[in-house]
């Protein structure tokens, strides 16, 4: 048994050594790391749309999701294992001073001439979105062109001001109206699936264009981010 364990350990060590040596040799043609910095645009779903329904007592109808264009920055650092595989860390910040809104109408029929209609206008304004993501990245070098794809996981920090404008009227029920502004901040799980292409300008410098679909656990879950900027290649 002792000899079997020694042989097994020796086999594992030898194979790991061969693997490490192979990766190091294959990585000689690849830069050790790549640093990206650039401009970013995001189209964010700040408030999901309302799916309407009708039954014998209640009818709910609403508008599509409230989306807003945000502008900001995007940066990443990728540490290359070899020419086609790396681990990427991605940071981005997107901002806007504008607002987006959805409108939902609820009609309640309670019999005997009792009918209540409530209109809710949900407004999201001045959003700030920061993403911190990490994951594998796959590349396919072809001369000056280097396409890549990645799958990233991490956290999204969303700060915005929400206000709900409520107006309710009806027959046989009280009438009310009001506005409730609330500043919100949340940290949620985030995920990005996407990729892009690098075009070599010179040996250690390239121009990047990339696009990502972002989603997570926040209120809105369907976002698109497009970034472009320069890539510095180190150690090649």
Image: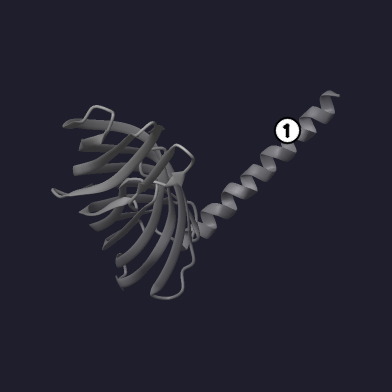
Relative horizontal placement of residue 150, taking residue 188 as reference (left or right): right
Q: Report x, y in % for residue 127.
A: 21, 43
For image coordinates 79% across by 34% down, the residue present is: 7
x and y percent of residue 72 in the render? 20, 52
- Please say whether residue 5 is visible from this viewpoint: yes
Please, which residue is most extreme toward the bottom here?
Answer: 143
State the residue at coordinates (44%, 62%).
Answer: 148
Q: How is the image coloured?
A: one colour
* Figure check: 22 above or below 55: below
Residue at numbered disc 1: 9
Where 210 sits versus 90, above or below?
below
Does the image show residue 92?
no
- For the residue pair 234 and 59, the one nearer the viewer reads as 59
Outermost residue, front side: 112
The N terminus - image quarter: top right
Depth order, front residue of 139/50: 50
Q: Residue furthest left?
A: 97
Pick the residue in front: 14 or 72: 72
x, y (%) of residue 145?
40, 73
In the rendered image, the quadrant that contains the C terminus is bottom left
Where residue 188 sits, quadrant-wise, is top left
Q: Residue at x 35, y 40 (%)?
A: 107
Answer with the quarter of the image where residue 162 lies: top left
């Amino acid at each position: 048994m002792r000899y079997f364990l020694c042989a097994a350990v020796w086999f594992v060590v030898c194979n790991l050594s061969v693997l490490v040596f192979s990766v190091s040799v294959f990585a000689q043609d690849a830069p050790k790391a790549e640093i990206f910095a650039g401009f970013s645009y995001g189209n964010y779903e700040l408030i999901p749309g309302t799916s309407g329904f009708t039954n014998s007592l209640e009818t709910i109808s609403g508008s599509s999701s409230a989306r807003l264009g945000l502008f900001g920055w995007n940066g990443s650092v990728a540490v290359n294992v070899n020419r086609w595989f790396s681990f990427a860390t991605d940071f981005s910040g997107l901002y806007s001073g504008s607002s987006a809104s959805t409108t939902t109408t609820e009609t309640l029929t309670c019999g005997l001439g009792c009918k209540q209609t409530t209109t809710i206008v949900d407004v999201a304004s001045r959003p700030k979105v920061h993403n911190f993501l990490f994951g594998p990245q796959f590349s396919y070098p072809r001369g000056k062109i280097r396409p890549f794809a990645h799958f990233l996981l991490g956290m999204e920090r969303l700060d915005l001001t929400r206000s709900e404008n409520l107006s309710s009227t009806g027959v046989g029920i009280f009438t009310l109206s009001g506005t409730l502004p609330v500043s919100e901040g949340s940290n949620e799980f985030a995920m990005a699936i996407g990729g892009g292409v690098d075009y070599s300008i010179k040996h250690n410098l390239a121009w990047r264009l990339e696009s990502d679909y972002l989603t997570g656990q926040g209120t809105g879950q369907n976002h698109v981010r497009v970034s472009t900027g320069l890539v510095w290649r180190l150690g090649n």
